[in-house]
Amino acid sequence: MDGNGRWAQRRGLKRTEGHAAGEEALFDTVEGALELGIKWLTVYAFSTENWKRPNDEVRYLMGFNERILVGRRDEMNERGVRMRFAGRRDWRVPKRLLRHQDQSVELTKANRTMTFTIAFNYGGRAEIVDAVRALVAEGTPPDKIDERAIRRHLYHPDMPDPDLMIRTSGEYRISNFLLWEIAYSELVFTDVLWPDFRRENLFDAVREYQERDRRFGGVEGS
Ligand code: FPP
């Protein structure tokens, strides 16, 4: 969900106002995904690198995330959305926010219309490190550490690899998002800044995806 800061700066607003405007973009996109029947949607809300931002902005983002959870989880629950979080639960994440995350997971855990995963204090490299650490802690012998074993120790082993990854705001980078999982995902880049993103932009990305030829390392028709 990139481009909030630039969206705000272009309007002479504070960066945090760009994040605030990103809320509508996010929930319109969730509605669009539900309309399309998408079963799994994952968004990058806060990265392990975002702690480097000015203190004020970090503090704002913690409160902002908490407000969104409290304000939206009932609506998500009514729409049949199962909410989940992916990332490190380390000392930097406010306890209150973790509590709200846990409550949102608990409230929505029986829902199956769509699984909506919020990557928070998430890093793709950290996720792989955590998986390997867990394997080592279990005493897994080196020759048993293979791709299946790592996959089983990712934050959500039941989450299928994404078919499509969308990056907004004209940046052509992965920025540490779902590194393991996107090995064969189709990537769509758009210049739209996140606060301007709406379900129609999701539909455009899905149309672009449908024109791609996925071979997963094989050859066509084999
Ligand atoms: C990146 O834009 C965006 C963020 C760091 C936060 C986005 C989060 C939300 C819209 C809400 C998430 C909350 C929940 C509970 C799902 P940027 O600041 O990097 O923009 P820039 O690249 O223009 O500076």
Image: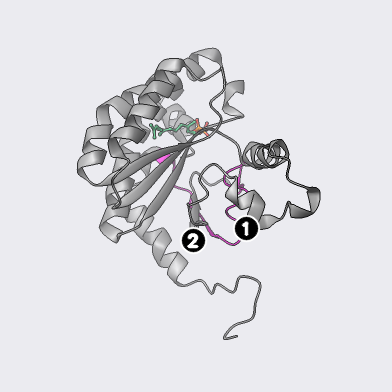
Magenta range: 172-194
Q: What amino acid is found at the position of numbered circle 1 in the picture?
A: Ala
Q: Tag on residue 136?
A: none
Closer to us: 79 or 31: 79
Closer to us: 105 or 54: 105
Q: Residue at x 44, y 31 (%)?
A: 10
In which quarter of the view is residue 25 placed?
Answer: top left
Residue 78 place in picture, x, y as percent: 19, 42
Secondary element at tag 2: loop
Residue 24 place in picture, x, y as percent: 30, 37
Report if the beta carbon of the residue with label 1 is closer than 8 angstroms to ligand 1: no
Q: Does the magenta run of residues contain 187?
A: yes
| Relative vertical location of residue 134 with respect to residue 152 in this rendering, above or below | above
Q: What amino acid is found at the position of numbered circle 2 in the picture?
A: Asp
Q: Tag on residue 163?
A: 2
In which quarter of the view is residue 19 placed?
Answer: top left
| Relative vertical location of residue 114 with respect to residue 217 in this rendering, above or below | above
Residue named by callout 1: 183
Q: Quadrant of the image for the C terminus?
A: bottom right
